């Protein structure tokens, strides 16, 4: 994607306190320049889902198809792809009625210009 494009598209990343985010330095450091920070990184407080509102909204969209506690291995790759496509093409109020896919493409074209 490139450093400039990444910085434009991902101005900050907010995560929960899961173990998958322990190595936050690897997420913010450019692979091309280890001294360059490519984004800001924030941890939300425990039990503060409201600090990640967009993430929680997407979780709700996913739960329309995959109930909480479900074993994801029970779903085929094709079904997971259909859910992913539906979620990425669902219009979002926070994006002015655009889907995540449309907003990404718009941002990519603006960055390239």
Image: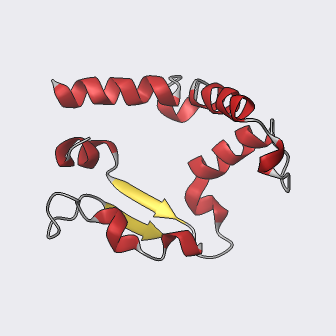
**In the displayed structure, would residue 75 be above or below residue 29?**
above
Image quarter where the N terminus lies is top left
Q: Quadrant of residue 28?
A: bottom left
Q: Nearer the viewer, residue 77 or 58?
A: 77
Residue shown at 37% from the left, 24% from the top: 105
Classify residue 73 as left or right of residue 47. Answer: right
Q: Nearer the viewer, residue 98 or 19?
A: 19
Q: Is residue 44 visible from the viewing direction of this image?
A: no
Q: Quadrant of residue 29?
A: bottom left
Residue shown at 78% from the left, 48% from the top: 73
Q: Nearer the viewer, residue 103 or 5?
A: 5
Residue shown at 74% from the left, 44% from the top: 60
Residue 80, percent from left and from top: 70, 35
Classify residue 50 as left or right of residue 107. Answer: right
Residue 78, percent from left and from top: 70, 28
**In the displayed structure, would residue 61 be above or below residue 21?**
above
Q: Quadrant of residue 35?
A: bottom left
Residue 41, percent from left and from top: 38, 66
């Amino acid at each position: 994607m490139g450093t400039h494009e990444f910085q434009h598209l991902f101005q900050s990343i907010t995560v929960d306190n899961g173990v998958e985010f322990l190595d936050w330095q690897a997420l913010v450091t450019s692979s091309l320049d280890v001294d360059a920070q490519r984004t800001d990184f924030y941890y939300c407080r425990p039990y503060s889902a409201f600090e990640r509102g967009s993430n929680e909204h997407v979780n709700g969209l996913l739960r329309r198809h995959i109930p909480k506690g479900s074993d994801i291995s029970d779903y085929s790759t094709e079904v997971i792809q259909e859910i992913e496509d539906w979620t990425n093409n669902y219009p979002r109020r926070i994006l002015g009625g655009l889907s995540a896919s449309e907003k990404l493409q718009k941002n990519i074209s603006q960055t390239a210009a």
